[in-house]
Amino acid sequence: MAKAKSVKEVGEKKNTPKIRIKLRSYDLKMLETSVAKVLGLLVKSGAKIKWPIPLPKKRKLYTVQRAHFVYKDSREQFEKITYTKLIDVVEVGDKTVEYLQNLVIPVGVLVEVRIY
């Protein structure tokens, strides 16, 4: 009868933490500069990354009446577009977390960091 191999015999992978960074903004130029800052720090720290993945933009449309009485049929439309980029850190470098904690991002960019 064949003996079942244990996990150590098969070869256990390192259980290194992975980081997923999601950046969102209404302004595309501000988002691109923030992504460039994050990528620069990640490369500097020695982390292995997957390049920024552009996610589909979300478009929210608002319709507002221009007048409330006589010209009620006249309407105006506004839109709000949210741009999103995703960065996956496959292997964490020596000082990756320290660099990410000291990162300065503009106010108009939302940053979500998940460690899994």
Image: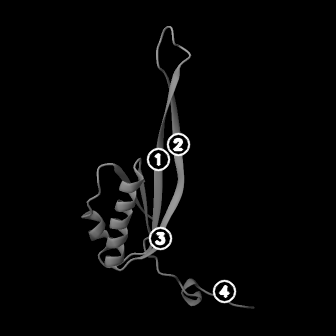
Mark 2 or mark 3: whose residue is earlier in sequence: 3
Task: Give the amino acid type for the residue marked by disc 3 in the picture.
Answer: Trp
**How far apart in space, not on screen, are marks 3 and 4 (Cα)?**
40 Å
**How far apart in space, not on screen, are marks 1 and 4 (Cα)?**
52 Å
Of marks 1 and 4, the one in the foreground: 1
Question: Residue 82 bears which disc, if any?
Answer: 1
Residue 8 in the image: above or below residue 62: below
Quadrant in the picture for residue 20: bottom left
Quadrant in the picture for residue 87: bottom left
| In this picture, residue 92 sits left or right of residue 54 | left
**How far apart in space, not on screen, are marks 1 and 2 (Cα)?**
7 Å
Dot 4 corresponds to which residue? 4
Between residue 14 and residue 66, name the one nearer to us.
66
What residue sits 47% from the left and 70% below the top?
Answer: 51
Dot 2 corresponds to which residue? 59
Question: In this rendering, does residue 60 appear at all?
Answer: yes
Category of crowding for the residue at label 3, using alpha-carbon neighbours closer than 10 angstroms: few (below 14), some (14–19), many (at least 20): few
**How far apart in space, not on screen, are marks 4 and 2 (Cα)?**
54 Å
Residue 67 in the image: above or below residue 85: above
What residue sits 29% from the left and 54% below the top?
Answer: 106
Dot 3 corresponds to which residue? 51
Residue 13 in the image: above or below residue 102: below
